[in-house]
Image: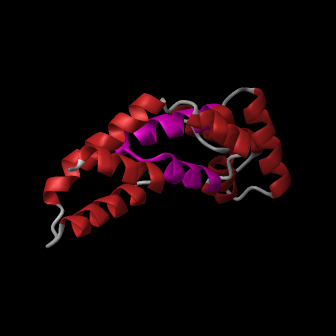
């Protein structure tokens, strides 16, 4: 594949949805391009504003929080796996409002509690906390919310 063909193809790949540099890099390597060509194409894509890591982090964090109800810890871990810088991750986390975050955690706990089984109330609360922590919410926040909401 020539450089021009690869550029046209990768532009449509980036235009379809927001992509991280690493996703684009992997896709370009799958086209059979060499490292120099890949890095030059990525520079061109950044100049043309097809790739913007800060924009990607904001969209990723906001959408994972709203659609999948993930917590900040899980979102941060996934962004790190995608090779996003700490600055961009912090910028993306600003998309999650504290009030919405608390309300979402409360909704998750209230909705899940009836389906959690256990002989003792403490065991039910422990299972509920593990569920919320697994979703990426901070343990201190989870336990505080459980004490506040579940009686």
Residue furthest to the bottom in view is 119
Applied colour scheme? secondary structure
Check the image and report above or below for 120 versus 77: below
Residue furthest to the right in view is 36
Q: Can the viewer see residue 66 in this picture?
A: no
Residue 3 is one of the magenta-drawn residues: no
Total marks placed: 0
What is the x, y in percent for residue 38?
77, 49
Q: Which residues are magenta?
A: 55-80
In this rendering, would 81 be left or right of 133? Answer: right
Q: Nearer the viewer, residue 6 or 59?
A: 59
Q: Quadrant of residue 123?
A: bottom left
Q: Can the viewer see residue 109 in this picture?
A: yes
What is the x, y in percent for residue 67?
36, 39
At 64% across and 42% down in the image, what residue appears?
Answer: 89
At 52% across and 39% down in the image, what residue appears?
Answer: 60
At 44% across and 37% down in the image, what residue appears?
Answer: 63
Q: Nearer the viewer, residue 63 or 2?
A: 63
At 31% across and 65% down in the image, what residue appears?
Answer: 126
What is the x, y in percent for residue 32?
70, 59
Q: Nearer the viewer, residue 13 or 93?
A: 93
Q: Quadrant of residue 44?
A: top right
Residue furthest to the top in view is 48
Residue 77 is one of the magenta-drawn residues: yes
Check the image and report above or below for 133 versus 108: below
Q: Nearer the viewer, residue 136 or 13?
A: 136
Magenta segment, prevailing SS (helix, strand or loop): helix
What is the x, y in percent for residue 96?
49, 33
């Amino acid at each position: 594949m020539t450089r021009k063909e690869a550029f046209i193809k990768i532009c449509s790949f980036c235009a379809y949805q927001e992509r991280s540099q690493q996703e684009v890099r992997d896709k370009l390597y799958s086209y059979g391009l060499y490292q120099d060509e890949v890095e030059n194409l990525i520079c061109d894509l950044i100049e043309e504003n097809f790739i913007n890591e800060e924009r990607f982090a904001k969209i990723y964090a906001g959408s994972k929080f709203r659609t999948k109800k993930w917590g900040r810890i899980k979102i941060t871990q996934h962004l790190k796996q995608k090779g996003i810088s700490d600055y961009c991750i912090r910028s993306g986390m600003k998309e999650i409002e504290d009030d919405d975050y608390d309300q979402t955690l409360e909704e998750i706990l209230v909705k899940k509690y009836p389906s959690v089984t256990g002989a003792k109330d403490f065991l039910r609360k422990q299972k509920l906390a593990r569920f919320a922590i697994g979703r990426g919410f901070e343990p201190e926040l989870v336990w505080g919310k459980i004490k506040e909401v579940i009686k």
